[in-house]
Image: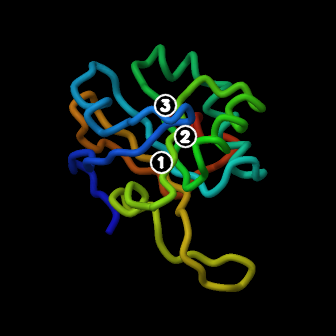
Amino acid sequence: MMLQIGDKMPAFEVVDQDGNAVGSQDFIGKGRKTIIYFYPKDNTSGCTAEACSFRDNYAALTAQGYNVVGVSKDSAKSHTGFRARHGLPFRLLSDPSTEMLQAFGAWGEKKMYGKTVLGTLRRTFIFDENGILERIIEKVDTKNAAGQIL
């Protein structure tokens, strides 16, 4: 079930691209809003466009008080290469078990090549400084993902 506006950020514990443990406690009460965007796969066209939109607008987003975090099922090693290849300045979290994806409602049925499959649902969640959900973007424009927030 997807989160609703006003919900608290779900508790989670995953690793980032460097293998460091990262949890919801790293974002709540730290004085910054948090953008958590879920994407299907590193190094695919739509996901790369989305990541590069956040990269290209990173200074504007941080100036407005946002943390930016990307999440997919990809391994930490895959994330390391993806970040380096595209110069991404923000953390990428690895959730191969899909526990975080499921907790946020970013895992479910979707159509792919005419078939219904289980997979990552491209969604962006924006939390306030206290970890309360302020906004959900379900129809992400990958080329203008950051522009949908700014």
Q: Along the polypeptide, which appears first: circle 2 or circle 3?
A: 3
Residue 106 percent location from the top left of the image? 45, 61
- Say what secondary structure mark 1 lies in: strand
- Say what secondary structure mark 2 lies in: loop
Residue 49 percent location from the top left of the image? 73, 42
Give the vertical position of 137 relative to 109 (above or below): above
Q: Nearer the viewer, residue 48 or 22?
A: 22
Cα distance between the residues tagged 2 and 3: 14 Å
Cα distance between the residues tagged 1 and 3: 10 Å
What residue is pinned by disc 3?
68
What residue is pinned by disc 1?
124
Q: Nearer the viewer, residue 34 or 82?
A: 82
Q: Residues within 10 Å of mark 3 (few under 14, many from 20)?
A: many
Residue 78 percent location from the top left of the image? 67, 44
Res 120 quadrant in image: bottom right
Q: Identify residue type, mark 3.
A: Val
Cα distance between the residues tagged 1 and 2: 10 Å
Q: Along the polypeptide, which appears first: circle 1 or circle 3?
A: 3
Give the vertical position of 122 relative to 18 (above or below): below
Residue 48 percent location from the top left of the image? 72, 43
